[in-house]
Image: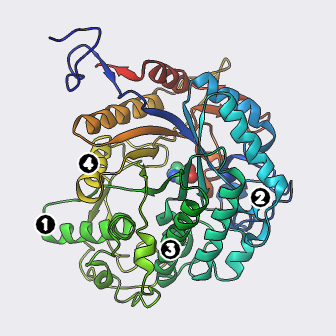
Amino acid sequence: MSNPASPPAGRLLDQGYELTFPPGFRWGAATAAYQIEGAAAEGGRTPSIWDTFSHTEGRTVAGHTGDVACDHYHRMPEDVRLMADLGLTSYRFSISWPRVQPGGSGPANQAGLDFYRRLVDELLAHGIEPWLTLYHWDLPQPLEDAGGWPARDTAGRFADYAQLVADALGDRVRHFTTLNEPWCSAFLGYGSGAHAPGRSDGADAVRAGHHLMLGHGLAVQALRAARPEAHLGITLNLYPVTPATDSPADAEAARRIDALANRFFLDPVLRGAYPADLPGDLRQVTDFGHVRDGDLALIAAPLDMVGINYYSRYVVAAPVSGTGPDAYWRAPSCWPGSEDVRFVTRGVPVTDMGWEIDAPGLVETLERVHRDYTDLPLYITENGAAFVDAVVDGRVDDPDRLAYLDAHLRAAHAAIRAGVPLKGYFAWSLMDNFEWAWGYTKRFGLVHVDYDSQARIPKSSARWYAEVIRRNGLAAQ
Ligand code: IFM
């Protein structure tokens, strides 16, 4: 019989009960090194591609750089206290490769590693589990000068770096993520050039995507050897791709974008093969001659979890008449071979990034990965929204962000009820930070940052999230 104090599994919705998450569900927030640390030239750190890119005129809004960012490098203990006040059980951060291995090869920089040792110790002292991401886009500049991710050798350098981090931090960190959003590194970094290093060549983007995945596979091998007990995964940014109409041409456009955005990474990593339709779509871009025997087996190294970053849905339509999906023109694009597919807006509410708010898309994404690819535990390693915030009387009320997070957590719960082995959720982001080419003009944080004084103010969404964590759930609507 049902007992209102302790709802039976499967009857968590629409019963006047709380929407309770499974016991042990991980509640976290995420950040990335270049977006928050600052101290760009301290402790032996050398430039990454993002230092170079952001210091190049015209690359970021208002010329913003990550030189100071949130000054987290100097304010780390205060920031960990903020996390503890929120009740976070996990914190996802990334290591700055050029801080711990300046130049991207050679010996470790102990001063850089010491910063992360202190961070991890501080987290553990507050009962917060560290989730370490090895690569969140800050390739050491000398490796870019040697060819960057389109060069095969970069994959090997990444595995060496993974080994170095495992040796230094593997005694106190259990959860390792190799790459964050390799689609962005490959297709924004080398396709459209909107991200560092700002190169625009479709073939390079495809090669970069492959070598990122190869680096992932080699890093998994190195990490497994160094730390057999480690819990290893990768984080992909995934989107449902919906045709704008039920026309066959729009369905074809959706297939093409889904292949590039999602299956380009899901299939090699979780099935050990590129999708069968991809080489045809890319035939005017590359012949995949960069793929060597044995690469895909390495890329598909067994994992312990898959991280999914979810923000929005793509709605796409066929090219306008006169071009066709096979038309290939060399304008910088993050969709090589499918540059002419149109991205359609539906007039639904959007965030300050212009991204449509679509919580059901999260359920679709989680169900797809579980149904079509893997039984592994899944984690939402990023989800969140930029909105314009105002400080009024020392407070920041952000009802739009709160509503976004609430809707997506309800979606996450629906996915669990549908059988998806979702084990945790990390809000993006712990605090406002350097939003890449957008600089400091977009705020995703649960915590507001005043970039002049570096004062932190938890927003109303942060207080709400703390309550969600405390209850391990949401109130039923
Ligand atoms: O800020 C980024 C993050 O670095 C990667 N995922 C998307 C976020 C919002 O754009």
Q: Circle 3 is placed at which residue position?
A: 214
Side (left or right) of 359 relative to 200: left
Q: Which mark is residue 247?
A: 1
Q: Secondary structure at mark 2?
A: helix
Verify CB contact (< 8 Å) between mark 4 and mark 3: no
Mark with earlier residue (4, 3)? 3
Give the quadrant of the C terminus.
top left
Q: How is the image coloured?
A: rainbow
Mark with earlier residue (1, 2)? 2
Q: Circle 2 is placed at which residue position?
A: 99
Q: Residue 444 occupies which quadrant of the picture?
A: top right
Q: Residue 155 occupies which quadrant of the picture?
A: bottom right
Nearer mark to the viewer, of 4 and 1:
4
Q: Circle 4 is placed at which residue position?
A: 367
Q: Give 126 or 467, whichever is nearer the viewer.
A: 126
Q: Alpha carbon of mark 4 to alpha carbon of mark 1: how far?
A: 25 Å
Verify CB contact (< 8 Å) between mark 4 and mark 1: no
Q: Residue type at mark 1: give it.
A: Ser
Q: Residue type at mark 4: give it.
A: Glu
